[in-house]
Structure formats: structure tokens, C-alpha cells
Image (spheres, rainbow, N blue to C red):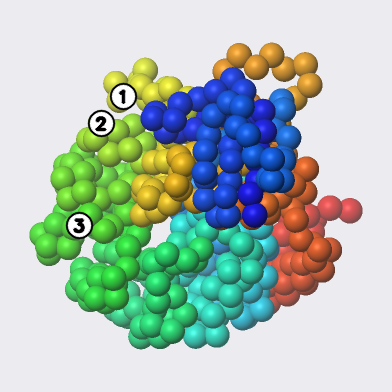
């Protein structure tokens, strides 16, 4: 099957390919075959991109996808109240079905918003069946996912200086469910690290992940909560740092810690909207840049932000520009931010060889973004970063398969999924004893 996305404004995010006022993208099977003006492909299905912007699918480098039923339930929460409600009350009552529908709708929410790849930091491993449900749902969604196997969210014994090791079921998942590293859904380790478990537990769990050949993601510098633990310093002293680790947040890390990560070849990820709302402190994006690390960005939790990356891009740009003025950190432009959400994001989750740019030979992960009527298109990159939103996403292609067309997800079970999602939301709230804000409406 060949597809020709025809006559769009093209932002390739590959300097060797360039950008075009009007060009086409030829897709052959699951790969990009060519990018440029006036491509001839008589045997290809044509998708008309006139008046739209074609760009690589957005890369969400950090999201807890299982929370698909919890959209905007904790928008007013800071980090402590988020722990007290979402993780302490709601997460423990998740059944296998809640994980299945949460992950499936969570992934589809992201696809609908133009996200084609996500690092799913999954800390809902209550049982082997819960993990299988999570992975099965991700496969059903058709999304490109790095599944970060985490831990059970059943109580404080799994957080706050936990002495519990990663569940042994991680080996079964790696060997039997996700043994390869080249499928749409691949495996990683969601490591609690020194801010949630002792350094000896961190060393044990990291050794398991490395034994299994897994990329690793860990939260560090989580605002005031993270300050006392000096996570990166402890990991360096224990000889644990490495180029196979992605570090998330980093708001309260000192400059020496960021330099240690950079020197080790580690990757970094910021989630600016949630970090600002939950009072972690200023996002560390430009402090990463100052040490030579180009970060990815992520939505983190849909309990508190929208389901895409457009809000994240706008927040990233605006706060970084303010920080440059106030604190003298490096200034950035809108292309930097789009890079964080595409090629840098792909690099930060270990898949830049496959996606993140419209490069011939890479996987065909492509989106088309509509522009409004009566909008003079002077700067397509600035429009995507600062003026577009999930509703502007017209087409989403992942691995050469169209998952959204003409502004609608391409599935025939959306009504049934909506019913299952509502049933899960209601059951979770009742079981947790939490009333969502809408419950107060007359």
C-alpha cells in the first residue's frame, strides 16, 4: 500500500530534508519513501494536504497512560494532594478492566491530539493480569509505545523510601510478552529511584532492567519533595548513572546533578504544564540545554492537563522565555520547542532511529494540522507551537496506518469505548470515595 500526502506545508524536522511551502510525502508500506514537491505516484492513495501543515507525529516522552478515565479530575491539585487522592485512593482500586480501558482510551486520547509515540510510565502493576491488560490495550490502540514497566500502586510501601524490589513478573513480561525492541510496543523500566526507594533498592532494580536490556526512566528533582534525596548524587556515588537512563522533571536538581547526567550521556524530559500547576518549580528545560542536553517533553498526567502536547509546547516556550529574562538561562525559539516534541522527544525515549522526523527510510508517523479560516500563515512552526490545539489535528498516521482521518479517529467502537470509560470512571470514583468536581453541579 502506498499513500501520497499531497500539497501540504511540510515541516520535516530534518535539516537534510528541509521544509516546504508546498510539497508531498510518499509513504510506502510503513515507511516514508520520499519528501518533496511534485512527487509522482499514480498507484498511491492520495490524502489532500492543501491548506494543512504536515509534520512528524508528536512524541510524548512521559505519560501515565493508565489514567485515561481520570481526565481533569485533579486540575487544582499540587503534588502532595495528587499523591493523596490519585495514587493513594484511586490507583489501588484499579481492576484489570479499569487498566484495560484506561490504557486504551488514554492512548486514543493522545492519538486524537496528534501524538504518535509515547513513553508510558506505567505504575499500575497490581498483578500479572493488570500488566497484560495494559500492554494488550496499547497494542489495540495502534500507537507507537515504549511501555515502562513499573510497580504496584497499592500503598505507601511502594513509595516513600520503599524497601520493595521491582516485581519478579517483569521477567515474564520481557521474555514472553515484549521480547523484541522493534515492534510498535516495546519495553522499558519505570524505575522509582532514590526519591521513592532506597539507593540499594534502586541499584537492585536498575540491575534487573539492565540485565533484561531495558531502557530506563526515573523521576528526579520532583520539586521540594525531591530536594532531600539528592538522587543524582547518590546514583553517581553508587556508579549507577549511564546513557541508558532518562531523567524526568529535574526541577529541584542542582546544576552539578544536571552536569552529571549530561556527562553520563543520559536523557532528560520535562512536563512543564503539570510541573507549574503542581508547584514543582520552574521547568528545568533550559537548564538542561545549558549543559548540552536537548530534552523531550510530556503531558505526564491527564488528571491535570490536556490530552496532547500543544499546551505543553506553549508552556515550554513561554516559561523558558521568561526564565531567560529573569534568570539568564538560554533563550529558545519556537522551532526548539517543536524539536523537543518531535525529534528530541524521540531521542529521549530511545526511538529516534525510527521516528521524530520526516526522513525517508523512517517509519511513517505523520500528522496533518488544519489552519483556521482567515488565518494568514506567516510562520507554520509558531502556529503549531503556540496557536494550534488537539482540535486542529486532521489526520494521524502511525506506522503507515491512518488512525485519524478528517478530524475523527478511525475506529468503529468509539461509542462502546465511551460507555466502558464512563462505567470505569464511575466505579473508580465510588470505590475510592471521591466525588469528581462535576458531582457538585445541579
Label pair 2/1, CB-CB below 8 angstroms: yes
Secondary structure type for disc 2: helix
Crowding at mark 1 (Cα within 10 Å: few <14, some 14-19, many 20+):
some
Q: Earlier in the sequence, mark 2 or mark 1?
A: 2
Instruction: Say whether residue 131 is visible.
Output: yes
253 to the left or right of 323 = left
The residue located at (50%, 25%) in the rendering is 19
Residue situated in front as seen by the camera: 308 or 379: 379
Q: How many marks?
A: 3
Q: Is residue 417 depicted above or below 34 in this figure?
A: below
**Circle nearer the viewer, 3 or 2:** 3
Q: Position of residue 75 (x, y in %)?
A: 61, 48
Q: Earlier in the sequence, mark 3 or mark 1?
A: 3
**The disc label shown at residue 242, or none:** 3
Secondary structure type for disc 1: loop
Label pair 3/2, CB-CB below 8 angstroms: no
Tell me the quadrant of the picture where the N terminus can be found. bottom right
Q: Position of residue 398 (x, y in %)?
A: 59, 53
157 to the left or right of 341 = left
- Residue located beneath label 1 in the image: 330
**Circle nearer the viewer, 3 or 1:** 3
Crowding at mark 3 (Cα within 10 Å: few <14, some 14-19, many 20+):
some
Mark-to-mark CA distance, 2 and 1: 6 Å
Q: Earlier in the sequence, mark 3 or mark 2?
A: 3
Residue situated in front as seen by the camera: 271 or 26: 26
Mark-to-mark CA distance, 3 and 1: 25 Å
Crowding at mark 2 (Cα within 10 Å: few <14, some 14-19, many 20+):
some
Q: Position of residue 351 (x, y in %)?
A: 40, 53
Residue situated in front as seen by the camera: 293 or 299: 293
- Residue located beneath label 2 in the image: 290
Amino acid at each position: 500500500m502506498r499513500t501520497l500526502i499531497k500539497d501540504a506545508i511540510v515541516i520535516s524536522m530534518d535539516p537534510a530534508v528541509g521544509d516546504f511551502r508546498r510539497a508531498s510525502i510518499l509513504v510506502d508500506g510503513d515507511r516514508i519513501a520520499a519528501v518533496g514537491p511534485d512527487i509522482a505516484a499514480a498507484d498511491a492513495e492520495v490524502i489532500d494536504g492543501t491548506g494543512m501543515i504536515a509534520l512528524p507525529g508528536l512524541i510524548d516522552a512521559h505519560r501515565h497512560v493508565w489514567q485515561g478515565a481520570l481526565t481533569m479530575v485533579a486540575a487544582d491539585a499540587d503534588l502532595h494532594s495528587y499523591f493523596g487522592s490519585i495514587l493513594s485512593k484511586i490507583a489501588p482500586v484499579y481492576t484489570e478492566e479499569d487498566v484495560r480501558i484506561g490504557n486504551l482510551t488514554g492512548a486514543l486520547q493522545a492519538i486524537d491530539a496528534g501524538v504518535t509515540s509515547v513513553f508510558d510510565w506505567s505504575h499500575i502493576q497490581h498483578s500479572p493480569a493488570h500488566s497484560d491488560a495494559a500492554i494488550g490495550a496499547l497494542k489495540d490502540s495502534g500507537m507507537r509505545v515504549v511501555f515502562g514497566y513499573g510497580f504496584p500502586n497499592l500503598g505507601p510501601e511502594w513509595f516513600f523510601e520503599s524497601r520493595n524490589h521491582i516485581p519478579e513478573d517483569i521477567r515474564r513480561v520481557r521474555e514472553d510478552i515484549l521480547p523484541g525492541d522493534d515492534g510498535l510496543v516495546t519495553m522499558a523500566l519505570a524505575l522509582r529511584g532514590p526519591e521513592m526507594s532506597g539507593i540499594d533498592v534502586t541499584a537492585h532494580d536498575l540491575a534487573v532492567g539492565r540485565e533484561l536490556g531495558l531502557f530506563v526512566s526515573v523521576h528526579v528533582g520532583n520539586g521540594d519533595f525531591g530536594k532531600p534525596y539528592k538522587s543524582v548524587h547518590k546514583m553517581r556515588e553508587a556508579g549507577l548513572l549511564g546513557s541508558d537512563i532518562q531523567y524526568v522533571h529535574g526541577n529541584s536538581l542542582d546544576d552539578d546533578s544536571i552536569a552529571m547526567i549530561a556527562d553520563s550521556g543520559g536523557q532528560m524530559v520535562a512536563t512543564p504544564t503539570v510541573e507549574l500547576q503542581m508547584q514543582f518549580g520552574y521547568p528545568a528545560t533550559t537548564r538542561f540545554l545549558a549543559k548540552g542536553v536537548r530534552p523531550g517533553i510530556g503531558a505526564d498526567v491527564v488528571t491535570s492537563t490536556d490530552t496532547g502536547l500543544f499546551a505543553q509546547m506553549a508552556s515550554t516556550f513561554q516559561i523558558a522565555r521568561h526564565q531567560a529574562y529573569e534568570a539568564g538561562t538560554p533563550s529558545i525559539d519556537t522551532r526548539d520547542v517543536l524539536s523537543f516534541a518531535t525529534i528530541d522527544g524521540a531521542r529521549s525515549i530511545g526511538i529516534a532511529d525510527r521516528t521524530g522526523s520526516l526522513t525517508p527510510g523512517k517509519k511513517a508517523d505523520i500528522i496533518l494540522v488544519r489552519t483556521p479560516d482567515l488565518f494568514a500563515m506567516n510562520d507554520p512552526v509558531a502556529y503549531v507551537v503556540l496557536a494550534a490545539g488537539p482540535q486542529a489535528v486532521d489526520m494521524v498516521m502511525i506506522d503507515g496506518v491512518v488512525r485519524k482521518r478528517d478530524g475523527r479517529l478511525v475506529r468503529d467502537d468509539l461509542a462502546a469505548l465511551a460507555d466502558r470509560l464512563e462505567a470505569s470512571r464511575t466505579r473508580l470514583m465510588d470505590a475510592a470515595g471521591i466525588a469528581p468536581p462535576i458531582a457538585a453541579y445541579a
